[in-house]
């Protein structure tokens, strides 16, 4: 997708918000979540979302639940968040852009609405997060197999 077509997409989405008060679905926000927020320089939203997820995981872990239950609840939280971002991503980005225009960011010569460095950092974080989920899943599978083998041996 070229830069012009992306600008056209957001121009149409913002016009729909202003004129018709209609929010449109954002596939990039849905699929990439926090990575999309960092790429669009929505740092405050990204930090709040990251801290919320992290604190939810710590609270769930502190309750003494089984790891597989924590992973299932974490997955449900992520899916709910992704659905929310898909539905409300354009509105969040619109509010961010309006605030930056109000502050005069658009008048700066070197201002760019996206950040490649933030995107690459977030991608690295995303890969580590996925690797941790896969690692937990493998640990759960090994634990289940060990429990079954122990019961079989005792019988």
Image (tube, rainbow, N blue to C red):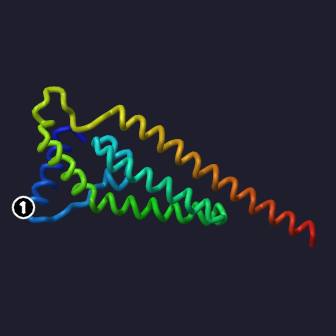
* 135 lies left or right of 10: right
* Picture residue at 13% right of the left edge, 60% below the top: 17
Badge 1 local density, few (<14 within 10 Å), some, or many (20+)? Answer: few
Q: Nearer the viewer, residue 66 or 64?
A: 64
Q: Position of residue 49 (x, y in %)?
A: 39, 53
User: In the current view of this chain or complex, which residue is farthest to the bottom?
Assistant: 155
User: In the current view of this chain or complex, which residue is farthest to the right?
Assistant: 154
Total number of numbered discs in the rendering: 1
Reading the image, the residue beneath label 1 is 19
Q: Position of residue 130 (x, y in %)?
A: 53, 48
User: In the current view of this chain or complex, which residue is farthest to the top?
Assistant: 109
* 118 lies left or right of 5: right
Residue 137, image quadrant: bottom right
Quadrant (top left, top right, bottom left, bottom right) of the N terminus? top left
88 over 37 or under it: above or below:
below
* Picture residue at 20% right of the left edge, 38% below the top: 3
* Picture residue at 52% right of the left edge, 61% below the top: 74
Q: Nearer the viewer, residue 58 or 19?
A: 58
* Picture residue at 36% right of the left edge, 62% below the top: 83
Of helix, strand and loop, which one carries label 1? helix
Q: Nearer the viewer, residue 88 or 5?
A: 88
Quadrant (top left, top right, bottom left, bottom right) of the C terminus? bottom right
* 32 lies left or right of 26: right
Q: Position of residue 44 (x, y in %)?
A: 32, 47
Q: Position of residue 86 (x, y in %)?
A: 31, 59
User: In the current view of this chain or complex, which residue is farthest to the left?
Assistant: 19
């Amino acid at each position: 997708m070229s830069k012009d077509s992306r600008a056209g997409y957001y121009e149409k989405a913002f016009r729909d918000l202003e004129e018709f008060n209609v929010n449109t679905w954002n596939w990039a926000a849905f699929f990439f979540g926090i990575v999309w927020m960092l790429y669009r320089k929505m740092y405050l939203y990204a930090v709040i979302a990251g801290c919320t997820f992290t604190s939810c995981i710590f609270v769930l872990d502190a309750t003494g639940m089984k790891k597989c239950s924590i992973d299932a609840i974490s997955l449900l939280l992520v899916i709910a968040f992704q659905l929310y971002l898909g539905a409300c991503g354009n509105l969040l980005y619109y509010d961010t852009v309006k605030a930056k225009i109000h502050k005069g960011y658009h008048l700066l010569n070197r201002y760019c609405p996206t950040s490649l460095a933030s995107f690459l950092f977030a991608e690295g974080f995303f890969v580590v997060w996925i690797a941790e989920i896969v690692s937990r899943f493998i640990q759960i599978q090994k634990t289940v197999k060990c429990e079954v083998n122990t019961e079989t041996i005792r019988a």
